[in-house]
Amino acid sequence: MQGFSDGGADLGQLQSTMRNIEVACTSIQMHINPAAAEATILALSQSPQPYTACRFILENSQVPNARFQAAAAIRDAAIREWSFLSNEERRSLISFCLCFVMQHASSPEGYVQAKVSSVAAQLMKRGWLDFTEAEKEAFFYQVNQAILGAHGVDVQFIGVNFLESLVSEFSPSTSSVMGLPREFHEQCRTSLELNYLKMFYCWARDAALSVTNKIMEPNAVIPEVKVCTAALRLMLQILNWEFRSDPTSMKAGIDVFSAGVRHDNASSKRSECVLVQPGPAWFDVLISSGHVSWLLSLYSALRQKFSREGYWIDCPIAVSARKLIVQLCSLAGTIFPSDSGKMQENHLLQLLSGILQWIDPPDVVSKAIEEGKSESEMLDGCRALLSIATATTPFVFDQLLKAIRPYGTLTLLSTLMCEVVKVLMTNNTDEETWSWEARDLLLDTWTILLVPMDGSGGDASLPSEGKHAAANLFAMIVESELKVASASVTNDEGDSDYLQASISAMDERLSSYALIARAAIDVTIPLLTRLFSEHFARLHQGRGIIDPTETLEELYSLLLITGHVLADEGEGETPLVPTAIQTNFVDIVEAEKHPVVVLSGSIIRFAEQSMDPEVRAAIFSPRLMEAVIWFLARWSHTYLMPLEEANCLSNDYQKQHQSINSRKALLNFFGEHNQGQVVLNIIVRISAMTLMSYPGEKDLQGLTCHHLLHTLVRRKTICYQLVSLDSWRDLANAFTNEKSLFLLSSANQRSLAQTLVLSASGLRNSEAANQYVKGLMGHMTTYLVELSNRSDLKSVAHQPDIIMSVSCLLERLRGAAAAAGPRRQRAMYEIGISVMNPVLLLLEVYKDEIFHFQISISLSSTLLSEAKTEKYKDLRALLQLLSSLCSKDLVDFSSDSIEATGINISQVVFFGLHIVTPLISLELLKYPKLCHDYFSLLSHIVEVYPETLAQLNSEAFAHIIGTLDFGLHHQDLEVVSMCLGALKALAAYNYREICAGKTGLVSAGHGNSPEGIFSQFLRSLLQLLLFEDYSPDLVSAAADALLPLILCEQGLYQKLGNELIERQTNPALKSRLANALHSLTSSNHLAFRLDRVNYQRFRKNLNSFLVEVRGFLRTI
């Protein structure tokens, strides 16, 4: 619609534009030809300089949606055309938006006002680095006058609302997309934080103070309440700011706490708590001014005034006030003076005194909620306790309440959570009620308190009263969990949900339970031992007489809880025995009597009973075996043949002789020279039995393969023992010959093969390890070779048993390849090379069969889909196998070189590329996982072995280039990034080859197009960067790819630059573009070299270039 442009618009044109937009908005609401209506609105937004028309609509239209769309069009056009708007035009647009919202402050269409206010905030941010301080002050003077109430309560509310929009725009997590690099947003954020944020807070506080007296009057009017609510909301928003001017300020969620207070490794938090650390400049505003006292008094007075009106707790002003109080509990860092924490303690005590009425006494509060009172206040009280715990130490946390009560804060925390747990037991339901949320908040509080402040990974200690509180709480927790477990037996609908949640989703909660248990470990370990004894006795006494299901469910829950108490998760590292267990029980030096040994031994003996077929049938259901296997895996990783056993004592503990003896007794009991081998043999036998005696139980078999068996081969000390055990040799033989193990799922086949191959590290020399691997995998190689050599291969290959065998063996080969290491490398390469041709033949056979399916069963879309899926799976397996073979992890650090073994990795890669390349189609790359695997492999190969691509024939090379071009325009950010990395490596290799006087890729026969591949990619990448939409996160990767492309095709780059310049009709824009293109390749001392420094310089240049020209290039 050409009339939408401002050029020469008269009153008639403006009225016509307004009517068109009004009709379009009405049509959308009435669902009348919505496509045409949306096109009309889009035309306004995309037309050049539509500002006069938009202002006319805002000032004259009677249709609120039309005014909303006009505001949106101003925003879109201004952001797009900002580079060639004059400074006066920019200021005029912002002033118009501010004046509009203030002049229409009493308008009932609040969403229109909010939109215009948001547009003003976004435009102010866009020009933030362009405007002078005087120009900013002029804008803010107008806003300040409004907030002070000089123009009435309605305008006061609008002023506060505008600052909310502005702060939101400057915060990185809530800012609007402007197509600018991160550096721009960071500079704006820093400037606002240092120069304006504190001032905005003071304005909001003054606005709230100005209406407080009127709110407290018997008949408070709504406008004043709105202003106070908005002011409180703005103060909360500012305190939620991620302050960076204070160097100690970090997020609690990143495991770092302020001013040496905490370094938190807690991983089980469900609710985020961020410390507020604005720095010493905020001391006068937040601490010394009596601000906290005023806020608590305001809420208390309002609470008293509306005490008989239950709805008031959830009204906006009450919610905003409570949230602000909770946020003030998180104040920490250098805002407090260096006075040994006294002022911070006084600050927290003042807040805690005000919050107590929300949560104490817990039983009264809980009863009121159950009778219908809102739970919001109680939950906010729990959040306040979490914030206080985050900001201080366990000792200070406990001492706070003792200043005004005869007991400490830990006792209150325990009593409060016990009450919540009682409610959960009473109202056992799958629905997430207030008690669920309260429990999670309070568990997070315990987690924060009990994780050590020094980041050592141990367990923080509590004062004696706190230990007693923790012991009482843990006993209540266990009682609750056992009740839930037994109740799930009769709950047919919820049973499966509880089943699925037990090990995965419950893990976070169980980790918090473990911390509480360890705080009073001398009480909780005997408690768990007694409960296990009672349940074991109940099972055997009632065997064959009483239904054991409830007892089994309770045992399931007990095993999970005990596993978390005794050991930490070991993903990625070897967990140590928890500090609480190491440092307690110091009076026990006889290993057999150590409480942890007694508890562990009773569970292991119970698990061993599963080897008896009769007992197994009666007691050990697949579900209970899941818990048994999970417990054994977690326990083994910590206690079974620990790395250094008694020699890993720390110096601190060596000073305490009794503690040393107790710890030695515990660590040595399950060590290599004591009971370790006996227990290891039991575990291996249980694992083998589980795999063969529970067919079809995929979850159980998965736990056995991926967790228990994999845990055993992580340490060489255990591997040395494993390979000498008859039970392990029996498992390896069963893997080779037992048909039931061929029925394991694909993932379990891979994991079991990987585990068995990894155990070869326990053999004393490379020759023995290679022979072991060959013996383990030889039958697979032989089968595949013999099958591929059969003359009737095409006829037998699709028999169900053959398909199952081939799939199984390929999965096992994948697992074995993933386990390849220095000692096992030669065997794995020989196996890999021997099966490459058979695998290729099988792929050809199955590919032909897919074609026959398409011809003979063209009407069966289901079978065709299954065939494609099988091809997809086969290709993924081949890609992953090739990735494993060429992985950097396979570098052999032994004395023999790779060349000595006759193996050249680049030849393997070259061979693999020739196999894979023809099979990868653009259609198959639409499968996300296959696409990711392919480009991950390709980027790795191009980076490490670029010469391999130069050796490919023209057809294969062109196919790879085509897939790279496809990947550059992919929607997945990671795929695009990998393609850019591959393109960087490819262009850099070509440039270095040419500089060295060699042929390069194009001259080597791979430049099939008139311009060559690098010319195509240079055009494509410049088109993407200048004219298309993409994530700002890709700019750095794109710069790294663009630099070598420019160096490879300098002539084309100059030509493309000249074409861009000549297309500009505006002389000013033409000059700007020419200067920007010149600076792109010359500023920051950029040189024609591909080294780290030049890549960094070019990234900066490209960022500046895009900020300068992208806006007006996309407009024209």
Image (cartoon, rainbow, N blue to C red):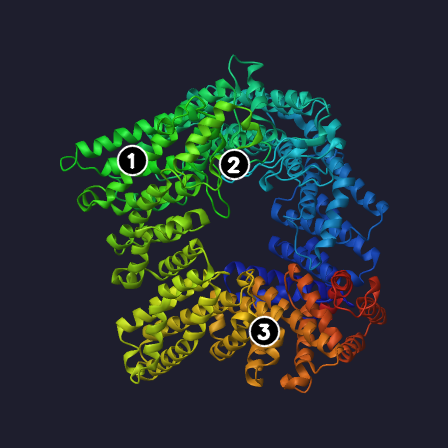
Which of the two labelled residues, at mark 3 and mark 2, occupies the earlier sequence position? Answer: 2
| Up-down relation of residue 2 to residue 514 (above or below) | below
Q: Which mark is residue 648?
A: 2
- Up-down relation of residue 173 to residue 511 (above or below): below
Q: Is label 3 or label 2 in front?
A: 2
Residue located at (46% from left, 42% from top): 569
Q: Is 643 rendered above or below residue 93?
A: above
- Foreground of the two, 809 or 538: 809
In this orientation, does residue 309 appear? Answer: no
* C-alpha span from label 3 to label 2: 52 Å
Residues tagged 2 and 1 counted as in contact (Cβ below 8 A)? no
- Is 505 on the left or on the right of 189, as rendered? left
Q: How many marks?
A: 3
Which three-letter amino acid code belongs to the residue tagged 2? Cys
User: Mark 3 to mark 1: distance in Å?
Assistant: 55 Å
Residue situated in front as seen by the camera: 41 or 508? 508
Element class at badge 2:
helix
Q: Quadrant of residue 219?
A: top right
Q: Quadrant of residue 126?
A: bottom right
Q: Amino acid at mark 1?
A: Glu
- Label 3 sits on residue: 964
Q: Secondary structure at mark 1?
A: helix
Q: Nearer the viewer, mark 2 or mark 1?
A: 2
Q: Residue at x 30, y 43 (%)?
A: 494
